[in-house]
Image (spheres, coloured by chain):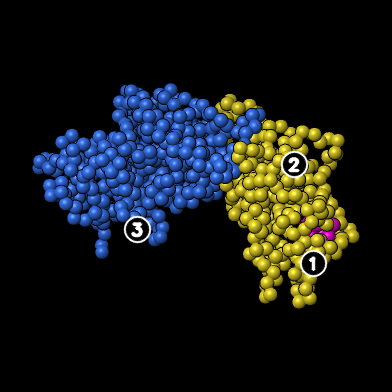
Amino acid sequence: MVRLKDLPTEELFTSGHRLCAGCGAGIIMRMTMKALRGPTIVVSATGCAEVASTIYPYTSWKLSWVHVAFENAAAVASGIEAAYKAMRRKGMWDKHVDIIAIGGDGGTFDIGIQALSGALERGHDFLYICYDNEAYMNTGIQRSGATPHGAATTTSPAGRKIPGKPEFKKDLIGICVAHGIEYAATASPAYWNDYITKVRKGLEVEGPAVIHVFSPCPLGMRHDPSKSIELARLAVQTRYWPVYEVENGKYRLNIKVPRPKPLVEFLKMQGRFRHLFQPEFRHEIDALQKWVDENWKRIAALCGEKV
Amino acid sequence: MVKVIGLTGDEAVAYAVKQCNVDVVAAYPITPQTIMVEAFSEYVHNGEVNTEFVCVESEHSAMSACVGASLTGARVFTATASQGLALMHEILYIASGLRCPIVMGVANRALSAPINIHNDHSDMMGSRDCGWIQIYAENSQEAYDWVIQAFKIAEDPRVLLPASVNLDGFILSHSMEGVEVLEDEEVSKFLPPRKPVITIDPTKPVTVGALCLPDYYFEVKFQQIQALKEAYKVIREVNKEYEVLTGRKYGLLETYAMEDAEAAIVCLGSTAGTAKAVAKELRKNGKKVGVIKPWIYRPFPEEDLIKAVGDVKALAVLDRACSFGAPFNALCNDVIGTLYRHGKNLNVFNCLYGLGGRDMTPNDLKSIFNEALEVAKTGKVKEYVKVVGVRE
């Protein structure tokens, strides 16, 4: 695991961007840049991290960075990788280029899942990072396939009849692992050394790798901006966000949580779950806790851990 | 020694791409374009090209991968048709907006619904405002010749825009003709490796695809307008150079028997071939008719059209795509706009024809020519938009 003193002091994702105070995405971008090992190109899907970091004529990126559209970061990365491969073969280019595609949960779980699946199947050498703030936060908090059960968004509001999102979260890593890729992992920015180590690992893999990282969103999850990292830690310590990796099909639990905190501690920090604490909706909290328990059991079993 | 080989339109495109030293092809199969990707896959798997062929999972990803590849400075090709082009629609605008000189073969096909695999121009016309250079070929030879020229035009630093080479689905894509091909070395000399202006070279950091708000967006789009204007000049230069190499003369448009014509047909693609044959027949009976065939649809060949029209008194403009609810269909709108802008007052009528692969027969064309002659004589247009060959 990487140590603080190993990290470069150089900032390739610089301040001055327009991300909100306490935004997880900004922290994650900065951390990601600490894991680079050589010439790198970042491909960004449309989303918060994209619109807020490159408002022309300014940019926060001190490396080559490309944005094309919302649903196609993995496809654009495929084209870039193919081009350098061809140009290297023809003697027009001599360096290895690391390619990182970055998308939010909307750009990954929903509209970009096809492009991602295609790129994983074709085996391009790139790292895909999904920063998951669990809704379409950039357009003003609409539910996505990554939004957890019960969460209130503007398209799954806390109504009198339907209290938030009825459906449960999609298993992104499960989908990616099913492609037979060499490396896939989840992470939380609260465990910075785990995350940065994983980014480096993902880059070192020859072929596609995927990292799914929890990204606190003060605006959309409605939490105190000064508590983003605390929330990201609670997500792990309540077993809501299991931190694990899958290397060549072998699962490993990176952060063990022997004495999990009750899920309500994670929920009560966030306004998006506030309505669930009304007596008539308390059963939804139970449903969410049950989902967390079962998901943990499933992942722990895959990791060969005793539950 | 002139080398002539039998090629379908699709094969002619693939053969040209093979000779153009393309770095990346990202494409997805769709009828009637499929032969292009099949033929090219053969070249890849037989080691005849050094191209990276990305078999993407959709046309949307095809164009996305092409944009990514093109930004590295690579030479890039893709091909599609119909629904595939429609699926790419979003990224077509990004390819031109990010100034990626991608070349794309389009085997023109009708759009659903109802689903139909045969030829019309609804696909490309549906994306005609995407900022691409748009070329229409009449036969396999032209498809071959234009692909090679398209790379040179698109990649010119004065242009830096993507270009589509359109050929009529099945009518050209699947019909074999004798095609005069160049030697590989001749193509390499005519089209040296791409010299990109700005790339995403990771050792020279650059931000591409930034968010442009109202304070900058319009200027970026204005540069595209200027680049398409520059393209007129570049196309002419490239055509001239290609003529020296091959003896085949290209331009923004082609005219047939226009010198003393009283009435003429304006149309795109393979229909022009039939129209020329019909005009030849009619001329034997003393009927003074001619044909104007724009090779380049965007940028629209305004000056050449005015010159070609000369003293003609009536034009019949043929459209193979419908602009539903518009006063005229696309090509006719452009022709009328051009005439108006240049103070040319002559009678024009529009014929919508051939949707979903409905044949345009020599007899249909004969009656259109005759009607155009009648309009020229009387100075009166009976019907401004005719629908040809449909059961009402």
Viewer-side residue, B35 vs A237: A237
Discs 3 and 1 carry the same chain letter: no
User: Real-space Cα distance between discs 1 and 2?
Assistant: 32 Å
Instruction: Point out which mark residue A30 bears.
Output: 2
- Position of A30 with respect to A156 (left or right) is right
Which tint was used for chain A?
yellow
Residue at horizontal 33 percent and vertical 35 percent from the top: B252
Q: Residue furthest left?
A: B285
Please tell me whether residue B113 is drawn above or below residue A72 in the rendered image: below
Tag 1 and tag 2, C-beta contact below 8 Å = no
**Crowd tier of the residue under label 3, counting other residues whose Cα lies within 10 Å: few below 14, some 14–19, many 20 or above:** few
For label 1, the SS is helix
Question: Picture quarter containing residue A142?
Answer: bottom right
Q: Which contiguous range is marked in magenta?
A: A235-241
> Is residue A294 in sight in this rendering?
no
Type of the residue with mark 2: Arg
Write down which chain is painted blue: B
In front of the other: B130 or A116: B130
Mark 1, residue position: A289
Does residue B381 appear left or right of residue A34 in this picture? left
Type of amino acid under label 3: Gly
User: What chain letter is assigned to the residue under label 1?
Assistant: A
Residue A173 percent across, percent down from the top left = 71, 53
